[in-house]
Image (cartoon, grey):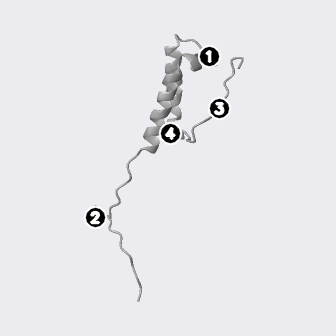
Amino acid sequence: MDDQSIFIGMAPFVVPPSYQTGLIEFREWLIEENSDAALNPETLRNELDDLLLDYFFDIIKITFDRPMPTLVNTDGELLQFSNLTLN
């Protein structure tokens, strides 16, 4: 409304701080894509929204879609779990 952005919903994910430099570089790239003009809410909403969403979901996929680690002992052998019972 009146060139103001209003969040209706947000993703329940936090972008990790390690992406801070990448986000700044992405912002600079968006400015270049916008013919070196300043970014404003209308431009971000109407022209660059697909790029913003793609970048966000790329970060979320890389951050949260990692394979589970493989647990090994100091010799590099897979850990085998067992139950210990006392008599």
Q: Which residue is mark 3?
A: 8
Q: CA distance from mark 1 to mark 4?
A: 28 Å
Tags 2 and 3 touching, CB below 8 Å: no
Q: Nearer the viewer, mark 2 or mark 3?
A: 3
Q: Which residue is mark 2?
A: 75
Locate residue 60, reporting x and y percent: 48, 38
Mark 2 or mark 3: name the one nearer the start of the chain.
3
Tags 2 and 4 touching, CB below 8 Å: no
Task: Please state the total of marks drawn on the protein image.
Answer: 4
Residue 71 in the figure: left or right of residue 32: left
Q: Nearer the viewer, mark 3 or mark 1?
A: 3
Q: Secondary structure at mark 4?
A: helix
Q: Which residue is mark 1?
A: 42
| Kind of residue sitting beneath label 1 | Glu
Any part of residue 22 in sight: no
Q: Which residue is mark 4?
A: 18
State which quarter of the image contains the N terminus: top right
